[in-house]
Amino acid sequence: MCVLGAFQVSAAGDVANWHTGNPDAIPAVGGAMDLAIGAKQVWVMMTLFANDGSPKLVPTCTYPSLAWAR
């Protein structure tokens, strides 16, 4: 089992958990992909809304996602 944080989760279960938040910056990739690929289950722990009030549960992720982790 793997527990990750996320910026967004799509209706299909895609997990977007890496982005610096700066429009001009390159997204920062951590070790989440390494953890998720070896796990039989991936659990996501996050708040339901971002600081600006936008939902984190979305129809499709706008940040890069771990689509294969579902």
Image (cartoon, rainbow, N blue to C red):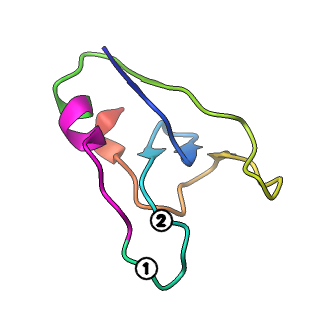
- Give the quadrant of the N terminus: top left
* Residue identified by numbered label 1: 25
Task: Spot the residue most to the bottom.
Answer: 24
Q: Are marks 1 and 2 in contact (CB under 8 Å)?
A: yes
Rate crowding at label 1 as few (under 14), some (14 to 19) or many (20 or more) other CA atoms within 10 Å: few
Q: Which range is magenta? A: 27-35
- Give the quadrant of the C terminus: top left
Which amino acid, mark 1? Ala
Q: Earlier in the sequence, mark 1 or mark 2?
A: 2
| 11 to the left or right of 70 | right
Rate crowding at label 2 as few (under 14), some (14 to 19) or many (20 or more) other CA atoms within 10 Å: few
Q: Position of residue 19 (x, y in %)?
A: 45, 61
* Residue identified by numbered label 2: 20
Task: Give residue 32's quadrant in the image.
Answer: top left
Q: Secondary structure at mark 2?
A: loop
Relative to 69, residue 26 above or below: below
Please check the rendered image and state whether residue 53 is part of the magenta-colored stretch, yes or no: no
What residue is drawn where x is 51% and y is 41%? 6
Q: Position of residue 13 (x, y in %)?
A: 48, 36
| 46 to the left or right of 37 | right
What residue is drawn where x is 56% and y is 54%? 60
Q: Secondary structure at mark 1?
A: loop
Task: Give residue 33's quadrant in the image.
Answer: top left
Which amino acid, mark 2? Thr
